[in-house]
Image: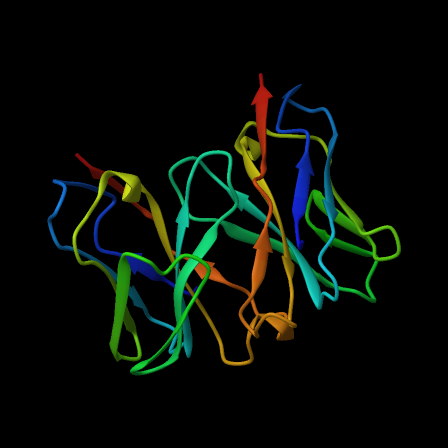
Amino acid sequence: KNQVEQSPQSLIILEGKNCTLQCNYTVSPFSNLRWYKQDTGRGPVSLTIMTFSENTKSNGRYTATLDADTKQSSLHITASQLSDSASYICVVSNPVESNYQLIWGAGTKLIIKP
Amino acid sequence: DVKVTQSSRYLVKRTGEKVFLECVQDMDHENMFWYRQDPGLGLRLIYFSYDVKMKEKGDIPEGYSVSREKKERFSLILESASTNQTSMYLCASTREGGITLNEKLFFGSGTQLSVL
């Protein structure tokens, strides 16, 4: 069964610290892997999109990595800020199902404390 | 920037009522989607549309219908609302090419629907 699992479910860190969020997937084949940030009460906003041939992509203080062999991705946040408090969602596209099929993880809730 | 606008942030309806959720995008995107988001679960696709008057069922279409009469507008209809349809509803749009061509999905702010 195609699944995307994220860990940890929630994480609390102090402002200024770094953190890494994990994503493991069983989707096969896949065409791309995405990370989204969702503030409370808002819609998700795209952070990165990586194809299976890319193994790292950065967007400011956010760096996503992808290991297509082990089917793992991580999102590293450097020098966290209070505005980083949000849910971070890993999403994998599965073109076999349809051109519109995305498999969504349940997200990691990140809380940054001052 | 792409703007996807959902008509209501919060909505409270009674069981059995017909509910309309409206979504408008301003970037001439071909594809539009309706998702629902429940605590502890990933987003689940209800319906999507790849062109005017064209629609396809997603993973959980039961109890819902959609309408796309104009390119910029995609409506989600709950014919007879039930308590298990209490959820956050998210509309999204993307350019032609589909998800597999690495196109960004742009989301609205969501509608939190409560069915009493």
The colouring scheme, among rainbow, by chain, secondary structure or one colour, is rainbow
Residue B46 placement (x, y as % from top left): 39, 59
Question: In the image, what residue occupies the spot 54% across and 30% down?
Answer: A85
Where B85 sits versus B67, above or below? above
Q: Quadrant of residue B25?
A: bottom left
Horizontal relation, residue B86 to residue B79: left or right: right
Where B47 sits versus B110, above or below? below
Q: Quadrant of the C terminus of chain A?
A: top right
Residue A19 placement (x, y as % from top left): 73, 30
Question: In the image, what residue occupies the spot 50% across and 63% down?
Answer: B105
Q: Is residue A101 visible?
A: yes
Question: In the image, what residue occupies the spot 57% across and 60% down?
Answer: A102
Q: Is residue B109 visible?
A: no
Q: List the single residue furthest toward the right.
A: A69
Horizontal relation, residue A18 to residue A68: left or right: left
Residue B35 placement (x, y as % from top left): 40, 55
Residue B115 placement (x, y as % from top left): 20, 39
Q: Quadrant of residue A52?
A: bottom right
* Most foreground residue, B55 or A77: B55
Where B64 sits versus B13, above or below? below
Q: Quadrant of residue B18?
A: bottom left
Total marks placed: 0
Question: In the image, what residue occupies the spot 48% across and 49% down?
Answer: B43
